[in-house]
Amino acid sequence: MPAPLGRRTQRPRGQPRYKRFRVARRGIFRSLRSSFTSTIKRKSVPCPNCGAAVDLQIKLVKITTCASCGTTLLLEDQGLRSAGAAGAMHDVPQLFDVGDTIRCDTTRITVHGHARFSYGRGFWEEFWGLDFHHQSVWVSVDEGDVIVQRPAPRRSWPTVTRAMTVGRDFSYDGTNYTVIEEDNAECVALRGSFDEVLQVGARYRFINAQSGANDVLSGEICNEDQRWFIGRWIDPFLVVNETRRGS
Ligand SMILES: [Zn+2]
């Protein structure tokens, strides 16, 4: 669910840049391309801050954190770029953690990233992972409540207004949703990898809207930037940590 704060325009990945070498020096072209533009395919690269090996195996990842020095690292065509501190993730007991494979009702998810957000009175946790079709999934955990969501298609995003306050109705994809929560939040800590750019210290407005008993639509708005996620509440008793159970 986290917001796309500080997202920057990037050249699409994988565009070859050394075309002129292609015919005459095919071998060199290949090796240049693999080392400069296919960063995401390399298994690990050195952290620009401390030199420790940073694991980069997942194609969708846009940012990751260095486990050694706690720096947030942006994946760019040129490699990794330092993007500030990843924040202190003071340990509190969690149902699961980065590296675990979990089952949320019928969806199996490998957890790759953990983001913590503060809304002033407390915190909630967002976990990013991949399902077994390698599709992006977010799991929100807030005081025992669990929501599993996926990015909502851009074409169906609702129009954000200031009037989207608690109790107001709006339509999404032909269904009526009611705003149940609307507040401001700040990203305070990051661990692991994410498929969207997050930054510790960034603030945004979030909106949670509900339809029926279980469907939840969540929006994150920062200036002109917005993203929406669609999913549902999961009974916490239907969340199983398969990694811990098997160990
Ligand atoms: Zn480092």
Image: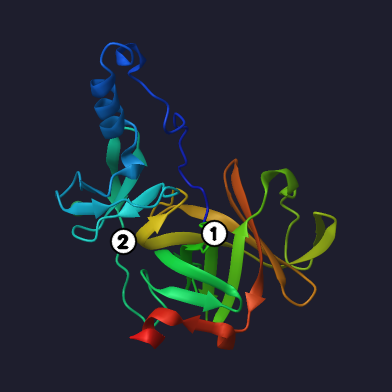
Q: Where residue 128 sits: x, y (%)?
A: 47, 62
Q: Where residue 234 sits: x, y (%)?
A: 62, 78
Ligand 1 within 8 Å of disc 2? The answer is no
Q: Nearer the viewer, residue 181 or 12?
A: 12
Q: Residue at x 80, y 54 (%)?
A: 173
Choose mark 2 or mark 1, whichever is in front: 1
Q: Nearer the viewer, residue 207 or 234?
A: 234
Q: From the image, which quarter does the C terminus lie in?
A: bottom left
- Disc 1 residue type (three-letter): His
Q: Is residue 23 left or right of residue 235?
A: left
- Disc 2 residue type (three-letter): Gly
The reply to whether callout 2 and callout 1 are in contact (CB within 8 Å) is no
Task: Please name the residue that numbered disc 2 is placed on.
Answer: 87
Badge 1 marks a residue whose secondary structure is: loop
Q: Is residue 46 left or right of residue 89?
A: left
The part of the image, by quadrant, that contains residue 76 is top left
